Amino acid sequence: MSADCDPAGLRVGGFLPFTMVDYPDALAAIIFCQGCPLKCVYCHNPDLMPACGRRRIEWRDIHKHLVRRAGLLDALVFSGGEPLMQSALPAAMSAAKKLGYKIGLHTSGIAPERLREVLPLLDWVGFDVKAPFDRYETITGVAGSGEKARQSLTLLAAAEIPTEVRTTIWPGHVDTNELREITSDVKQMGIQSFAVQEARDPLTSIPKGGEIFDDPVLLSAFAGKFADFTLRRAA
Ligand code: SF4
């Protein structure tokens, strides 16, 4: 096994041993993978963007924790940063799966080939759809990122992996009209679960709001498209 495909090669910038909000209806631990190629305007994890960060948590220490908590926790969530950027991801997911953990993934879908590799290991995915697929660059700053996301979401839908699509509202770039387009597209792809999230300004931490949050009629129209619909206000 080459070094970067060994789970020990996983670059981890943060680890939370217990969370009740990052995997639906389950007690979980969550790993924040280091490195993300996108530059979202509302990113609150800039420390996780570089491929190598200032802080590194060793996989062997996480694995020891997972062994101790096996049977007490239900799931392990790989978040980021962008977990799909790491070649050590499949091995790390397999190791956790062998201990009995359900595997969750938070992703932007920027690497469909890696997603294809880990599909058989996934139990649930939280998938950020950042903008209409042909206008992703306005949020992510990266050309072609929308097409990658579309390919990844298509893979998840075809594999019938339970997936919650989340869209963060960033007024001026993603607002009501864009949300209409996004919800129609993902509904057509077979997605049943959708969440609208309120952004916070990364500099001031002030919630950005947007017209949708003050319009119950509009909200219920979006909610009516999906079996599950969640509205997440910035707390
Ligand atoms: S995908 Fe997530 S971690 Fe990456 S830049 Fe966007 S918000 Fe930040």
Image: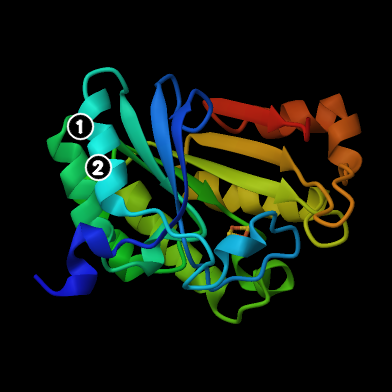
Mark 1 and mark 2: Cα distance apart in space:
6 Å
Residue 86, position as x, y percentages in the image: 34, 67
Residue 64, position as x, y percentages in the image: 24, 38
Amino acid bearing label 2: His
Which image quadrant: the C terminus? top right
Q: Residue furthest left?
A: 1
List the residue tagged with mark 2.
Answer: 63
Residue 85, position as x, y percentages in the image: 39, 68
> Would you say the residues marked 1 and 2 are in contact, meaning their CB atoms lie under 8 Å apart?
yes
| Left or right for 196, reference 27 | right
List the residue tagged with mark 1.
Answer: 67
Dividing the picture into quadrants, the one containing residue 65 is: top left
Please tell me which residue is depicted at 47% across the width and 62% down the height of the picture.
34
Mark 1 burial class by Cα count in 10 Å: few <14, some 14-19, many 20+: few
Q: Is residue 230 visible?
A: yes
Disc tally is 2
Looking at the rendered structure, the secondary structure element under dot 2 is helix
